Image: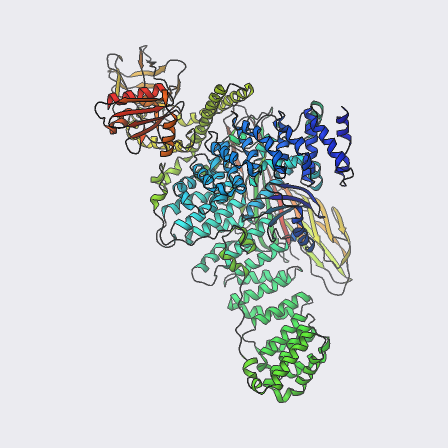
């Protein structure tokens, strides 16, 4: 599989290199740089590049490219998935995956990569086992290490690798035993010019923050499990049990993890909780913009963190807008108009009005509007956790379930 | 102390800030000094800085000697960092690297499996060809290690050694073959990975493992699953018949059924692997299942989307017009049509692929939705020209809307966007290739002066030239307009204009002679070589040669076939879906073509496992019903097994007598395990409850009574199913088997008088359950009244599993109870107590013969001869026979396995000591690790049979 991995930032420097087989000189990245330079946007770099003797598979996140070098036929998705797993791991270890955090924790990154792959084939990718091998850095431990001379490397040998529940660390102890479940739904919507929905679907997740001692065995039942007909699970979920009884039964990993994600397709019409009325015309010298945003199906819940973004065409020079609520920012270099509205109460739509300075002679095409918002304590699909039981441990854990609806890729065409 | 201060202050800062300011010598001297010190934290500091330099791609190979000295360090972190360094630079410093080998060799013998594992991992990562023989030995040992973790590492080590020394292939293939038979899912994934790296063509090795691999699929780790599914796909295409022709092979069904749940995996590569398995192997009717999974993957990051869309495009492109397959690709993705709608936040590659998929999905039913969508895209600046082309493709695919598309396209020509105009004209040119309506042509000709893009202009001229007969009256004038601006035109346009001139010359010479000559004159003195060249060529053809100019018409006015739309995704179909070669559309190194299905499946007996747990009920739905219970039980069993391992390890510790801490650790682990086991037992309690319900006591008892007779085979079978997967066999080569013979005859221990009204008898059901020997107690109440609270007790210190409280026995009823006892390989008689509520207590003793304390195992012939040669001296007993014995009756007395009735193999349940009985006409030979057991078994056979 992977021969080598290079961390490349958007300005074309190699931050870090790691080789699992014979060393491949970093000049291999020149092929990548050539293509990177040609692409206007970093996302336009093709993920898989063929060079005379090697194949480069890259993944882009947060202004960093991970460029994997392989020499023989390998399922490309396997490499891509693995690289994303690497990013996830680093995000959990260092709170963010970025240029600076990678530079700062260079040695630990190197050690982690060494543990994750053996001869280029994934060996340990479970967060819990990795944390057993190499303790994540934190402020307190850093100070303690300074004083006592200890290190982040675990002294004891990790036994998690040997157990038949490889995702869970052994000997977990907490004084407060608690488990939090976040049911998050993102709605992907395309609304056309006339305001009717072209396409809508729900992408849902159940994220868990589990701080339970010992080896708890959890069972979660849902009020309406039939909703989840297209679902993917964390390996800890007993699939047979789900198939037969529609009950989620699992021994959870320690810490944060995604228990399941589901997808509710476009056929089941999804109710959109927000509407946008827009009049945009980008005529030269007479550009106008008039937007109204309001809640559609209130359901008694407040829309929060509403942000509206428009990337204007190049010919737009400036915007002169007045908003009834929130802040407006227009960046003349990136042409991004951002309207941060915040909360929208029921029955109080927000408006944005004003003129737009457009240069040139032709009428520019109207740019699409993208929208972000959040609704607490509501999921659009109506999914609900019925009960949550724990077996295998004697203590009474604290359990909490939270529901959130968010805008995913919410696009309004104009 | 000075070096410490230096270490903290000197070069670190300069390096971190980018420029290497200090020259190498002083910097490395500094690091060397730190490495040579005797403080661990100083060394660790130095190592960290060195690793930092490696990560940045700096060469620090000259520190090799100083670093390798520390390879045997006690400090875990230091050791690990040194390993990292060693693996990186060993290749460049081969001689020095040899110094470290002995450390690893020592560690390979460590009692702790994790230390053994990591030593093997680092040892085999050192790319020094000289060490290859040592590696081979280490790997050969490790594949037979009793720890599954070490076996896994060994599997990983095989490809490493292979890349170092490809000549070792035969030996390594043997190791792989051995590992493929492993029962632990931890090992299987890596074994398959090794197989795939070294001998992917040796599919014959897989025959006997095929079914086990299929069943084990769900439990293997996700990365192993990917490799495994890809390999099984190849196997199925190579060995099994096409399920679309005739009834599908049961093995195909097994494979598909085991892979199907993995469509639900969180790992998108696993999903992709299952998808390609279904695409290449499954009957066409089952294909629809994969569409939904693929569409779900579209929610992933852009890289995933890119790969998935490329694959979807290929699936859709698979002969969409051909009967039959068309229906599949259509119904597959039709419900998800809207998932391919472009979002403004998609990356441009994804957008283009989505467009492609959309147009290949187009049909009479959805063409209007798609066209409306495409029209929106025309207004998106970065998608405009692909969208126009997509409209063109729609027009070709669905004849009914081609007129509508054409009108739309013509309208687009007057668009203000140059790119749109250009691509619209190009598309129109393609569509009008065969025939062009007059009104469209004249409209294009009128629009021509406003067109700016050279390509568009050239296309219009080409159209006019091709269909010149239809616009005879307008064409000369059209040429005149072009001639007016000829010198400023682009080369493309000029060439097309020349072509038009030639055609006019042919069809309407009298009207256009002047203008044609004018154009040729202009071209003759053009700036461009190509135009001048073309002009000379045409002039000579037309005016100078008599012979050729006679055939002018045939040369220039022949009909040309319309160009076909061939997408690049169609040719990708020759590559396996989901492969790198497929995405790049080129044959990658080591890509293996997927073979065509054979006409008939290879003999299914090839795939027959030596021991198939549930072969009889491959698709039985019953199986799934008790699966949950099974799962739980499985966990339990596996834990037990872990315990087993640890037991054995402790034994090792004892024998080696070193490292106290290790023992401590182990005992800690063990106590953990015990805790878990307790939990598990807690778990299982509620399940047992429904049975002894007070109200239906009598019924329950009757049930109990009848159960052992009728229900026995089934429960036994289930137990076995579980055990097959988890039962621990020390070397991995031993395979625990079912008992070949189960004695139904009971041995009466207590008669009515001794038992005070109860008759107690025992039999041995020969169930395999870890180190436990199963004993079936049958108790019959011969008194006139019910007996309450009957209970079986045993002396303390005996490990007994199972419910020894029998409860109440009604008059005349019989109850049987299975107890699992760990005798620790000893035939000493044990005391048992039968008590009941009325105060009667009966003590009795009995011993379990060694023949019942062993379990049958299967060994390969090589292993048998190896074991026999190993077990000499005290461990071998030979009894000379006066009369030949009947070998078939041996199974009555010894629970052993035999394939030919001359060699019987078994192992003791507690300590897993191998025991091999060889029977000939004249003698019985018994080889056993435990000499007492060996002698007793040989003796009992010689006496009884």
Residue B861 horizontal side relative to residue A223, left or right: left
Q: Nearer the viewer, residue B825 or A347?
A: B825
Residue B563 horizontal side relative to residue B647, left or right: right
Residue B775 horizontal side relative to residue B945, left or right: right
Residue farthest bottom in this picture: B510
Rendering coords of residue B800 (x, y %): 39, 19
Task: Identify which residue is drawn at 46% across, 22% down.
Answer: B647
Determine whether A288 is above or below B260 in the image: below
Quarter holding the N terminus of chain B is top right
Q: Nearer the viewer, residue A241 or B432?
A: B432
Regarding residue A31, the answer to whether it shows in the image is yes
Rendering coords of residue B619 (x, y %): 37, 42
Rendering coords of residue B78 (x, y %): 64, 28
Q: Nearer the viewer, residue B464 or A177?
A: B464
Residue B637 horizontal side relative to residue A173, left or right: left
Regarding residue B266, the answer to whether it shows in the image is no
Task: Identify which residue is drawn at 69% across, 47% down.
Answer: A307
Quarter holding the C terminus of chain B is top left
Which color mode does the image show? Answer: rainbow
Query: Would you identify the image quadrant in which residue B819 lies?
Result: top left
Q: Nearer the viewer, residue A383 or A34?
A: A34
Rendering coords of residue B577 (x, y %): 50, 52
């Amino acid at each position: 599989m992977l021969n080598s991995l290079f961390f490349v930032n958007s300005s074309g420097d190699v931050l870090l290199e790691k080789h699992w087989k014979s060393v491949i000189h970093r000049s291999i990245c020149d092929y990548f740089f050539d293509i990177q330079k040609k692409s206007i946007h970093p996302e336009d770099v093709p993920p898989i590049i063929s060079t005379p003797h090697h194949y480069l598979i890259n993944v882009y996140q947060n202004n960093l490219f991970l460029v994997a070098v392989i020499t023989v036929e390998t399922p490309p998705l396997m490499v891509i998935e693995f690289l994303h797993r690497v990013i996830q791991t680093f995000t959990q270890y260092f709170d963010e995956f970025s240029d600076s955090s990678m530079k700062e924790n260079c040695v630990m990154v190197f050690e982690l990569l060494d543990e994750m792959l053996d001869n280029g084939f994934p060996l340990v990718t479970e967060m819990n086992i990795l944390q057993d091998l190499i303790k994540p850095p934190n402020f307190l431990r850093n100070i303690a290490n300074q004083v006592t001379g200890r290190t982040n490397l675990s002294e004891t040998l990790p036994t998690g690798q040997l157990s038949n529940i490889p995702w869970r660390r052994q000997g977990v102890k907490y004084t407060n035993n608690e488990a939090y479940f976040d049911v998050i739904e993102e709605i992907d919507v395309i609304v056309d010019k006339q305001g009717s929905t072209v396409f809508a679907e729900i992408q849902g997740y159940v994220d868990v923050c589990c701080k339970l001692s010992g080896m708890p065995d959890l069972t979660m039942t849902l009020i309406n499990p039939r909703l989840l007909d297209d679902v993917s699970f964390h390996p800890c979920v007993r699939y047979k049990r789900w198939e037969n009884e529609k009950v989620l039964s699992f021994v959870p990993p320690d810490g944060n993890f995604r228990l399941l994600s589901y997808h509710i397709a476009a056929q089941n019409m999804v109710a959109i909780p927000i509407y946008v009325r827009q009049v945009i015309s980008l005529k030269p010298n007479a550009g106008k913009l008039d937007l109204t945003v309001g809640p559609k199906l209130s359901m008694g819940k407040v829309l929060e963190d509403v942000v509206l973004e428009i990337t204007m065409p190049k010919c737009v020079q400036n915007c002169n807008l007045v908003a009834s609520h929130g802040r407006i920012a227009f960046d003349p270099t990136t042409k991004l108009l951002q309207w941060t509205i915040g909360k929208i109460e029921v029955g109080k739509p927000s408006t944005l009005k004003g003129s737009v300075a457009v240069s040139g002679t032709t009428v520019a095409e109207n740019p699409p509007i993208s929208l972000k918002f959040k609704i607490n304590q509501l999921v659009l699909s109506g999914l609900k956790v019925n009960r949550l039981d724990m077996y295998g441990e004697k203590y009474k854990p604290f359990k909490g379930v939270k529901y959130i609806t968010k805008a995913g890729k919410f696009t309004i065409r104009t | 102390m000075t070096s410490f201060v230096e270490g903290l202050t000197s070069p670190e800062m300069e390096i971190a800030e980018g420029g290497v300011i200090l020259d190498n010598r002083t910097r490395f001297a500094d690091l060397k000094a730190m490495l040579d010190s005797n403080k661990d934290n100083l060394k660790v500091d130095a190592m960290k800085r060195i690793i930092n330099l490696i990560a940045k791609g700096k060469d620090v190979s000259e520190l090799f000697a100083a670093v390798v000295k520390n390879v045997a360090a006690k400090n875990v972190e230091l050791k690990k960092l040194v390993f990292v360094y060693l693996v990186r630079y060993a290749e460049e410093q081969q001689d020095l690297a040899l110094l470290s080998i002995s450390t690893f060799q020592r560690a390979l013998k460590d009692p702790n499996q994790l230390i053994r594992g990591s030593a093997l991992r680092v040892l085999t990562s050192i790319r020094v060809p000289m060490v290859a023989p040592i590696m081979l030995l280490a790997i050969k040992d490790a594949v037979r290690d009793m720890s599954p973790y070490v076996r896994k590492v060994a599997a990983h080590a095989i490809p490493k050694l292979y890349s170092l020394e490809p000549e070792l292939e035969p030996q390594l293939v043997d190791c792989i073959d051995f590992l493929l038979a492993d029962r632990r899912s931890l090992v299987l994934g890596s074994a398959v990975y090794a197989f795939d790296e070294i001998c992917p063509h040796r599919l014959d090795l897989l025959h006997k493992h095929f079914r086990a691999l299929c069943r084990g699929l769900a439990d293997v780790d996700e990365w192993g699953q990917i490799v495994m599914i890809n390999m099984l796909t190849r196997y199925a295409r190579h060995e099994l018949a096409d399920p679309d022709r005739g009834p599908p092979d049961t093995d195909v069904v097994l494979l598909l059924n085991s892979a199907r749940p993995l469509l639900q995996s969180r790992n998108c590569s696993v999903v992709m692997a299952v998808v390609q398995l279904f695409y290449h192997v499954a009957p066409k009717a089952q294909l629809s299942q994969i569409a939904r999974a693929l569409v779900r993957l579209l929610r992933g990051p852009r890289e995933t989307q890119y790969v998935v869309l490329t694959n979807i495009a290929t699936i859709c492109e698979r002969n969409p017009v051909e009967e039959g397959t068309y229906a599949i690709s259509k119904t597959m993705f039709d419900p998800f049509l809207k998932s391919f709608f472009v979002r403004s936040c998609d990356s441009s590659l994804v957008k283009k692929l989505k467009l492609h998929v959309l147009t290949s999905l187009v049909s009479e039913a959805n063409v209007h939705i798609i066209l409306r969508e495409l029209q929106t895209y025309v207004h998106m600046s970065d998608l405009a020209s692909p969208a126009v082309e997509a409209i063109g493709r729609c027009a070709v695919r669905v004849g009914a809307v081609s007129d509508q598309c054409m009108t739309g396209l013509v309208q687009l020509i007057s668009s203000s966007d140059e790119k749109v105009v250009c691509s619209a004209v190009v598309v129109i040119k393609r569509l009008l290739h065969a025939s062009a309506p007059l009104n469209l042509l004249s409209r294009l000709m009128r629009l021509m002066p406003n067109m700016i893009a050279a390509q568009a202009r050239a296309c219009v001229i080409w159209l006019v030239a091709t269909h010149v007969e239809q616009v005879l009256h307008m064409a000369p004038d059209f040429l005149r307009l072009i001639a007016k601006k000829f010198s400023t035109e682009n080369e493309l346009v000029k060439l097309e204009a020349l072509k038009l001139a030639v055609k006019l010359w042919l069809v309407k010479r009298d009207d256009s002679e002047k203008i044609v000559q004018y154009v040729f004159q202009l071209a003759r003195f053009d700036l461009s070589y190509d135009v001048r060249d073309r002009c000379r060529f045409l002039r000579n053809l037309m005016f100078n040669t008599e012979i050729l100019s006679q055939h002018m018409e045939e040369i220039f006015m022949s009909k040309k076939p319309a160009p076909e739309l061939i997408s690049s995704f169609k040719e990708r179909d020759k590559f396996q879906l989901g492969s790198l070669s497929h995405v790049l559309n080129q044959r990658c190194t080591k890509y293996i073509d997927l073979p065509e299905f054979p006409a008939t499946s290879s003999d299914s007996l090839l795939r027959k496992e030596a021991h198939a747990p549930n072969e009889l009920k491959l698709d039985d739905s019953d199986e799934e019903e008790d699966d949950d219970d099974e799962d739980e039980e499985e966990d339990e069993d596996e834990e037990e097994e872990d315990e087993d391992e640890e037991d054995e390890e402790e034994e090792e510790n004892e024998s080696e007598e070193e490292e106290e801490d290790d023992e401590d650790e182990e005992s800690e682990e063990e106590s953990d395990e015990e805790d878990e086991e307790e939990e598990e037992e807690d778990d299982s309690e509620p399940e047992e409850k429904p049975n002894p319900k007070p109200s239906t006591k009598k019924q329950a008892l009757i049930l109990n009574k009848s159960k052992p007779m009728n229900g026995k085979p089934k429960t036994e079978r289930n137990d076995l199913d579980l055990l097959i997967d988890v039962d621990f066999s020390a070397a991995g080569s031993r395979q625990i088997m079912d008992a070949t013979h189960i004695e139904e005859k009971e041995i009466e221990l207590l008669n009515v008088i001794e038992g005070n009204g109860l008759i107690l008898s025992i039999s041995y059901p020969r169930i395999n359950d870890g180190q436990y020997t199963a004993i079936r107690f049958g108790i019959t109440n011969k008194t006139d009244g019910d007996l309450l609270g009957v209970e079986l007790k045993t002396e303390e210190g005996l490990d007994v599993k199972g419910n020894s409280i029998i409860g109440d026995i009604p008059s005349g009823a019989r109850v049987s109870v299975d107890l699992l006892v760990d005798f620790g390989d000893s035939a000493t008689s044990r005391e048992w107590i039968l008590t009941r509520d009325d105060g009667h207590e009966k003590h009795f003793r009995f011993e379990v013969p060694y023949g019942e304390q062993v379990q049958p195992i299967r060994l390969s012939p090589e292993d048998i001869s190896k074991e026999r040669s190993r077990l000499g001296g005290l461990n071998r007993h030979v009894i000379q026979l006066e009369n030949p014995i009947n070998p078939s009756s041996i199974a009555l007395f010894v629970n052993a396995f035999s394939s030919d009735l001359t060699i019987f193999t078994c192992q003791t349940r507690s300590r897993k000591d191998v025991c091999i009985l060889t029977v000939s006409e004249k003698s019985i030979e018994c080889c056993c690790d435990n000499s007492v057991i060996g002698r007793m078994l040989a003796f009992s056979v010689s006496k009884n049979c």
